[in-house]
């Protein structure tokens, strides 16, 4: 499965969230680090949902870039 991930650069770090998996987040010092960490977070998030007998949300969010100006 492929989930959409939103990566944001802050003043001192990068943050990542997964819109289809509320609460699944990661923070890293670099873009590469946060990408690695969010991948690990997704795997763990899905494992916890399965072990708890909770439904696993499928990937539904679509991402596109829109040019303005």
Image (tube, rainbow, N blue to C red):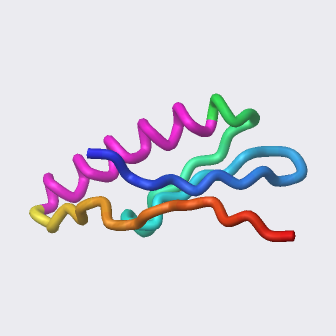
- Residue beneath the point at 32% across and 66% down: 60
Name the main secondary structure of what is drawn in magenta. helix
Q: How many marks?
A: 0
Which image quadrant: the N terminus?
A: top left
**The magenta segment:** 34-52
**Residue at the farthest left position:** 53
Relative depth, front residue between 64 and 2 = 64
Which image quadrant: the C terminus?
A: bottom right
Relative depth, front residue between 63 and 69 = 69
- Residue beneath the point at 42% across and 69% down: 22
Residue 59 lies, in percent from the top left, at 30, 60
Query: Would residue 30 be counted in the magenta stretch?
Result: no
Query: Would residue 46 be counted in the magenta stretch?
Result: yes
Relative depth, front residue between 27 and 7 = 7
Residue 9, placed above or below residue 31: below
Residue 35 lies, in percent from the top left, at 56, 37
With 15 as the anchor, is 36 left or right in this view?
A: left
Residue 55 lies, in percent from the top left, at 15, 67
With 31 as the anchor, is 10 left or right in this view?
A: right
- Residue beneath the point at 15% across and 61% down: 52
**Residue at the farthest front position:** 69
Residue 20 lies, in percent from the top left, at 38, 66
With 16 as the anchor, is 4 left or right in this view?
A: left
- Residue beneath the point at 38% across and 47% down: 42
């Amino acid at each position: 499965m492929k989930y959409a991930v939103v990566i944001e650069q802050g003043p001192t770090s990068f943050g990542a969230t997964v819109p289809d998996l509320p609460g699944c987040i990661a923070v890293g010092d670099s873009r590469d680090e946060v990408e690695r960490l969010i991948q690990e977070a997704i795997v763990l998030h899905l494992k916890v949902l399965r072990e708890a007998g909770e439904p696993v949300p499928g990937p539904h969010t679509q991402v596109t870039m829109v040019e303005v100006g």
